[in-house]
Amino acid sequence: MTAFYTALHLAFLWIFQLVPAEPKLGPVYHKITHLIPPDFPLLLIAGAIVFDLVRRRTETWSRWAQSIALGAAFLVGFIAVQWPFADFLMSPASRNWIFATNQFPYMFPPTFAPVRNVFVLTDHTPAQFWMRMALALAVAVVTTRIGFGWGEWMRRVRR
């Protein structure tokens, strides 16, 4: 699924830039000559690969123990790849047709942080950062457990 998500998102990213378009509403802050593509996809596939590798070793564990291990593995794998990649996406090297980080909707004013390629700090203290990471871990664990439950229910569905 993550490979499909990535491939579809990349297709939108690269094909939209080939479609001629121009803004019909104001205010227009940027000269636009084609459809504006979505942002580069999140690298969820890295977390999914780590998830699959860890899952092989946890098959005999209880569903909650598996959910904790796999949720944590997914989060660690995702952050380990996405964090440095996000730094790259903020750099001038990513402002090209492949990554499209220089493409902005016409209504974004020049003072908008993404247009200026400025990182906006949302966690003002280390405690806020770690609270959000703990929340991300909790969400990863709970959604993994929901996925197990859904899969077990789907396995029992008969025609």
Image (tube, rainbow, N blue to C red):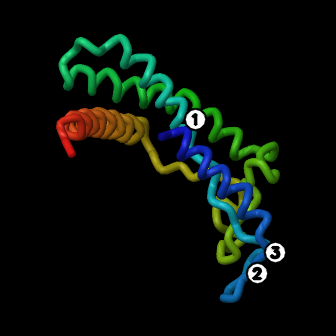
**For this view, does 111 lie left or right of residue 63?**
right
Q: Amino acid at mark 2?
A: Glu
Q: Is residue 142 above or below residue 9?
A: above
Q: Position of residue 70 (x, y in %)?
A: 35, 24
Q: Is residue 86 left or right of residue 4?
A: right
Earlier in the chain: of badge 2 and badge 1, it is: 2
Q: CA distance from mark 1 to mark 3?
A: 32 Å
Residue 101 in which image quadrant: bottom right
For the question of whether residue 88 can be seen, the reply is yes
Q: Which residue is mark 3?
A: 33
Q: Residues within 10 Å of mark 2 (few under 14, many from 20)?
A: few
Whole-Å distance between the Cαs marked 3 and 2?
Answer: 5 Å
| Rendered location of residue 89, percent (x, y) | 69, 44
Q: Residue at x 45, y 17 (%)?
A: 53
Residue type highlighted by circle 1: Trp
Q: Which mark is nearer the camera, 1 or 3?
A: 3
In space, the residues marked 2 and 1 are separated at their CA atoms by 34 Å
Residue kind at label 3, given as amino acid type: Thr
Q: Which residue is mark 1?
A: 83
